[in-house]
Image (tube, helix red, strand yellow):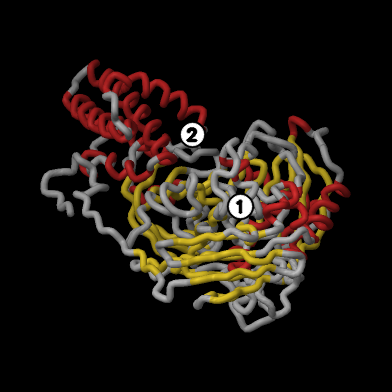
């Protein structure tokens, strides 16, 4: 740990002794409570971003206190140092909060290098540090919670094994699992949200600040000469499932190994075989209950995995010989019901063996992000809209009850090939076969161009599917079968953007009880139509029966090109207290 930090920061003697493990959230909350009391009188009503004001005030106060400390003598020197340390701790608590809520503001709270180096050793590890280019391996991990929330974490590991959480000031980049990256930005030590990281890296995902150097794993091979966007999505994935409990509750074994085996290698395997049209499956073994040297009151998933691996090896299993590793355990302090590396090979299942949770996490391992929905009030896809996380009620990567992945997701996986998804480029009558049936040359889905981003060239598509109560999609009967099975389902998604899948509600405001219930009938049923003035798309559903669906589609040959507005800000990420002579843009 110290070797890398000494090289990176070159801090004064005594700093390394103060560097400790990541502060737990509880400690930061206590500090932050005191900080809010201290600053409450200074925040004027009407401010929309009080944290930004507080960060600026605290940074200015810290610099002023440093000057007072520098001038103090005798006994007053110790008093001034005590005040400086206290102020640094309070500011650190606020910065730790901003890392999660508004990381861009940290760039405005950087103390100039000459003043930072002049700070005493007692506060050095509570300051933001400029980070020059550093290389390491980056992975993304979803923590999915029971209450419908999630945390997307980006975990960065250096060549010598030090681990940090990376935060982006804008939209996080999408990258292949385990990519080697180069980044520069800010470093805040010991502020990780849990004890499994050593601090936070804050990065602006722009030119010169973040670069993907190389990726990672070789992919699987499809039966056609087509390379899917995602790698390693075909064939059987051998999976080792490890049942572990904790030293403070060693008798807690809520499921038998046989139960878990049936759920994962029976039910969930059947789901993947069906959803992939026979192109993917899972098989493997279950390691029966072992107790690890960890309490259920902690949340250290990587340590849990390491201990479980050791126990599996002691029982004659080789974790390295499997494509996937799944850790199943009684509920602990982590809070999430499931967690998985996106495109990785590890997932954690916390306090449940629910099919939906496990299939969802294994979907993340395949490389899938969440399937969401677009809520636009009384409109389908225009006006004032917001994204509902997990909002796709017809997809396992949303809230769908073990329902098929949508067409955009299957296209990324390579389970639907270009010949299975018909690109609509001219007006006409189009047919779709039931989405759940095996490909046979007929259209499994349609995609219609909505717009092209002028800056990136990325195309936004409207996907159409026809869902029927076949196989696992029979679970959609719990939604609104009279709607879902008698109409066409619409999704919007952007190519090259893995997290852009949005279910559209073709029947907005159909239920006065609110958003959740309004999303139980999103299909465009027979006799109804949908049109977009921006793209010139018109769709009407004419036929929907057990054989298939038929639609009339009109398109505008000149697709809308979305321009990019340019807004010039006066050095938005330059701190307002830079040294004299500093060049700003």
Percent of width and height locating residue 95: 37, 36
User: Along the line of sight, which residue is nearer the eye, 437 or 66?
Assistant: 437
Residue at position x 51%, y 51% in the image: 374
Percent of width and height locating residue 77: 24, 21
Give the number of the disc on residue 522: 1
Residue at position x 51%, y 76% in the image: 427
Q: Give the labeled residue for mark 2.
A: 23
User: Along the line of sight, which residue is nearer the eye, 204 or 412?
Assistant: 412
Instruction: Classify 503 as above or below 22.
Output: below
Percent of width and height locating residue 343: 60, 61
Quarter placement of the C terminus: bottom left
Residue 131 is left or right of residue 367, and the answer is left
Q: Secondary structure at mark 2?
A: loop
Q: Secondary structure at mark 1?
A: loop
**For discs 2 and 1, the disc positioned in front in the rendered view:** 1
Mark 2 in CB contact with mark 1 (< 8 angstroms): no
10 Å crowding of disc 1: few (<14), some (14-19), many (20+): many
- Looking at marks 2 and 1 on the same chain, the residue that comes earlier in the sequence is marked by 2
User: Along the line of sight, which residue is nearer the eye, 401 or 296?
Assistant: 401
> Which quadrant of the view contains residue 576?
top left
Number of numbered discs:
2
Residue 556 is left or right of residue 145, and the answer is left
Instruction: Classify 462 as above or below 228.
Output: above
Residue at position x 30%, y 21% in the image: 83
> Would you say residue 467 is visible in this rendering?
yes
Percent of width and height locating residue 371: 58, 54
10 Å crowding of disc 2: few (<14), some (14-19), many (20+): many
Residue 276 is left or right of residue 454, and the answer is right
């Amino acid at each position: 740990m110290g070797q890398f930090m000494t090289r990176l920061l070159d801090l004064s003697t005594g700093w390394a002794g103060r560097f400790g493990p990541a502060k737990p959230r509880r400690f930061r909350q206590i500090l932050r409570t005191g900080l809010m009391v201290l600053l409450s009188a200074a925040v004027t009503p009407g401010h929309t971003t009080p944290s930004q004001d507080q960060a600026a005030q605290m940074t200015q106060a810290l610099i002023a206190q440093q000057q007072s400390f520098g001038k103090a003598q005798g006994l007053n020197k110790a008093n001034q140092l005590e005040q400086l340390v206290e102020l640094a701790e309070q500011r650190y608590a606020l910065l730790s909060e901003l890392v999660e809520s508004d990381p861009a503001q940290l760039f405005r709270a950087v103390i100039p290098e000459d003043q930072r180096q002049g700070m005493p050793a007692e506060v050095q590890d509570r300051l933001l540090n400029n980070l020059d280019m550093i290389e390491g391996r980056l992975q993304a991990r979803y923590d999915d919670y029971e209450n419908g929330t999630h945390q997307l974490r980006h975990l960065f590991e250096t060549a010598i094994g030090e681990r940090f959480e990376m935060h982006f000031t804008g939209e996080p980049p999408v990258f292949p699992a385990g990519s080697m990256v180069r980044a520069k930005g800010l470093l805040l030590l010991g502020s990780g949200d849990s004890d499994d990281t050593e601090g936070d890296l804050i990065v602006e995902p722009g030119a010169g600040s973040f670069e993907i150097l190389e990726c990672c794993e070789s992919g699987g091979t499809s039966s056609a000469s087509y390379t899917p966007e995602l790698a390693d999505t075909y064939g059987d994935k051998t999976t080792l499932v490890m049942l572990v409990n904790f030293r403070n509750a060693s008798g807690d074994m809520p499921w038998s190994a046989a139960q878990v085996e049936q759920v994962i290698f029976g039910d969930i395997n059947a789901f993947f075989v069906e959803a992939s049209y026979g192109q993917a499956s899972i098989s493997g073994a279950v390691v029966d209950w072992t107790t690890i040297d960890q309490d259920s009151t902690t949340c250290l998933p990587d340590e849990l995995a390491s201990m479980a691996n050791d126990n599996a090896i002691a029982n004659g299993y080789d974790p390295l010989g499997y494509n996937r590793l799944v850790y199943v355990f009684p509920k602990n302090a982590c809070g999430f019901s499931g967690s998985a590396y996106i495109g990785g090979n590890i997932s954690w299942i916390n306090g449940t063996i629910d099919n939906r949770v496990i299939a969802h996490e294994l979907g993340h391992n395949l490389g899938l992000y969440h399937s969401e929905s677009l809520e636009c009030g009384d409109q389908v896809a225009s006006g004032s809209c917001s994204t509902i996380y997990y909002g796709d009620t017809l997809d396992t990567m949303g809230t769908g009850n073990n329902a098929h992945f949508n067409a955009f997701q299957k296209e990324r996986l390579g389970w639907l090939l270009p010949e299975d998804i018909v690109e609509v480029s001219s007006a006409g009558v189009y047919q779709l076969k039931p989405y759940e049936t095996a490909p046979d040359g007929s259209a499994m889905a349609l995609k219609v161009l909505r717009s092209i981003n002028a800056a990136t060239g990325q195309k936004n598509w409207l996907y159409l599917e026809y869902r029927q109560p076949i196989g696992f999609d029979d679970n959609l009967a719990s939604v609104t079968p009279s709607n879902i099975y008698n109409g066409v389902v619409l999704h919007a998604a952007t190519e090259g953007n893995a997290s852009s899948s949005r279910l559209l509600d073709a029947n907005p405001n159909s239920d006065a009880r609110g958003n959740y219930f309004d999303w139980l009938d999103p299909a465009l049923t027979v006799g109804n139509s949908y049109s977009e003035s921006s793209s010139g798309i018109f769709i009407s559903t004419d036929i929907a029966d057990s054989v298939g669906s038929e639609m009339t589609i009109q398109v505008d040959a000149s697709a809308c090109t979305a321009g990019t507005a340019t807004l010039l800000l006066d050095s938005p990420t330059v701190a307002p207290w830079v040294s004299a002579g500093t060049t700003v843009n």
